[in-house]
Structure formats: structure tokens, C-alpha cells
Amino acid sequence: MRLCLVGFGSVGQGVAEALLLKNKFLKKRYGLNVKVVAVADSSGAALNQNGLNLEKLLKIKQKTGKVSNYPNYGVEGVTALEVLDEIDYDCLVEMTPTNITDGEPARKLTIKAIKDGKDVVTSNKGHLALYFPKLMKIAKKNNVKFKFEASVGGAMPIINFAKYNLPSCSIESIIGILNGTTNFILSRMASEGSSYEQALKEAQELGIAETDPTYDVEGIDAACKSVILANSIMELNCTLEDVDITGITNITPEAIDLAKDEGYLIKLIAEISKDRMEVSPRLVDKNSPLAVDGTLNVAMLKTDLAKNITVMGRGAGPLETASAILTDIINIWREK
């Protein structure tokens, strides 16, 4: 399978590292020979129809910050859309930054690849939260695979789990923690007595929170993920505008302590059902499956036949997210 990687930040580099680690495994277990024939970032691209050397590519990116500096095969200034016309590939792996204003450039890249008859795997949330029904309709019309496990919960396998392991069940609701950054902040406030500002600073120093943490701390990231789950698992046909959102910026150490005294923790909880779409801080019993610490994500699926099922996993990290992307690539290979 020939891959075109668009976006070569931490997640894109994680995918390259994962492929270096797992290439022999993929060939032996699945008969899947993966070649990365193109990689694009904001500087341009590196293209080689015979496959790029991922080890060399990673060294160049880490040393110079530009994949276009790849010897002989680097092209400076070329756009990702142009790359899709320049190279013959089988699957687009789209990992550009999330944009919840208009979903670009992910939306245009995804639609072009699909209309060109290429399969698509994405870790992006923006275009899915804004245009999910339209994108799925285009994918179905063009008879291609469009997968997005990595867009929700990092390594937590919730979308594939619901699709492949619970096909007999109707899922009535999903309640969970879908953002690792806010969970880390609230966990540190609870365990260390830190203020919100202190916990956020620590998260930023550890690389868990972005320099601008707005998407995370205001609940927008979790809301985007809620929309994706609502559409992909529960077929609710909703968008980001349908979610009531409250972030964690007003949570105080006093509120945390008061909750602890009563046997509760405060967590940023997403609730998804046909009657309610909400992301907000809530009290969680300290013995609840939702009482997870650090950057862990967790989701409880309420079903008609299997009752309540809980899934948990690391919600962030390059290799963790790459594991979900590779799972989607493997599933495309197996299905086709």
C-alpha cells in the first residue's frame, strides 16, 4: 500500500516512527507492504514513487524542520493539494492541524482524495465535526474507505470497538472523558492542590498542553470528538453547533477540595445521546470507571444488549495516535 502523508508534525512523525518499528510485523502478519511515497508539510514535500527512506526523512525534519530538504526528492513550496496530483498513491493519511472554523485544509484534501478514488485515514477533528455527513456521503458515492479512529481519544479504540465488536447492539449513550489535557490539569489540581494556572503551566512545560490551550480548556476539542462519536457510532447527524460546551477555566482548588471531601472528583465530561449533547465539568464518584488520572481518556457505552461497556486508553502522544492510524490502514487493507 502506497501512502501519502500530509502533515508531518508530532503525529506525522509518530506514524513514520511506527512504520519503522512495525514494517516487518505488517508484512508477516497481514501481508501488507507499506511504502510512503510522499510526505508534505508547510514547507513543501518530499516525493519518491519508489518510497522514501523514513529514517532519513525523520532526521531531516528534526534537523531542519522541512521535509522539502530531503535530498533529490524534496520540492519546496509545493502545496499538499498539488502533491495529490503529483504522486500515485493508494491512501491519504491526513494529519494537518485541526481547524474548527472551516475545516481547512483537511476538508479540501479529503474530498479531493476521495473523488480521485483514494482511501483516506485522518487524525483531524475539524472537518469531521463540521461536515461529517457530507464527507461520508462523498466517500460512499466514490466507493472508498474513509477512517478516523485517531480523531477521538488517541489510542483509545472507541470507534472501531463499537463498529467491529458491538455490531449486535444499539448504543443508547456515550459518557466519557475525551480530552487528555484537561484531565491532566484537573488530576493535578486534585492530587497536588494546584491552582488551575499552576496545573496548566505544568501541562505546557511537559508538552501536554499547547501554548494556546483554548481548544482544550474551553471544551471545544472534547465537543468536536463528541460530534464525531455521535455521527459515526450513533448516527445522530449533528454538528459542533449542537453541543452545549462549558470548559474548566473557572474550576477552583476550593471546588476540587469540596468535591474530594464528599468522595467525588471534578472531571470534564462529554455526554452524547439523542436527547443531550454536552461537554461540561461534572462530579464523578472516585470509584467510578470515569475516575481516571493523567492524560487517560475513558468512555462508557450504554447499550441495549451488552448493557454498560467501558473503554480506556491514552488520549495523546505521537506513537499512541499513530497506533490508531495504523489500525485504520490495516483495516482498509483487510477489508479491500
Image: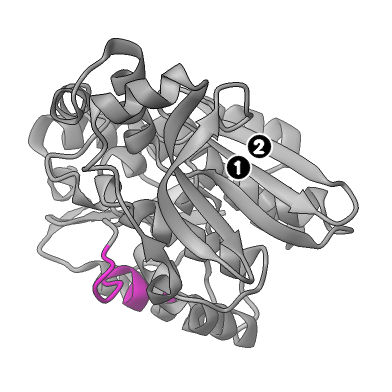
Name the image quarter holding residue 47. Answer: bottom left
- Of mark 1 and mark 2, the one earlier in the sequence is 1
Label number found at residue 96: none
Question: Is 108 within the magenta?
Answer: yes
The residue labelled by disc 2 is 311
Tell me, yes or no, if residue 150 can be seen here.
Answer: yes
Rendering coords of residue 114 (x, y %): 50, 77
Which residue is located at x 66 percent, y 73 percent? 235
Depth check: 325 or 217 in front? 217
Range of residues picked out in magenta: 99-110
Element at label 2: strand
Q: Is residue 56 left or right of residue 164?
A: left
Q: Which residue is mark 1?
A: 299
Q: Amino acid at mark 1?
A: Ala
Residue at position x 35%, y 13% from top?
191
Spatial CA span between label 1 and label 2? 5 Å
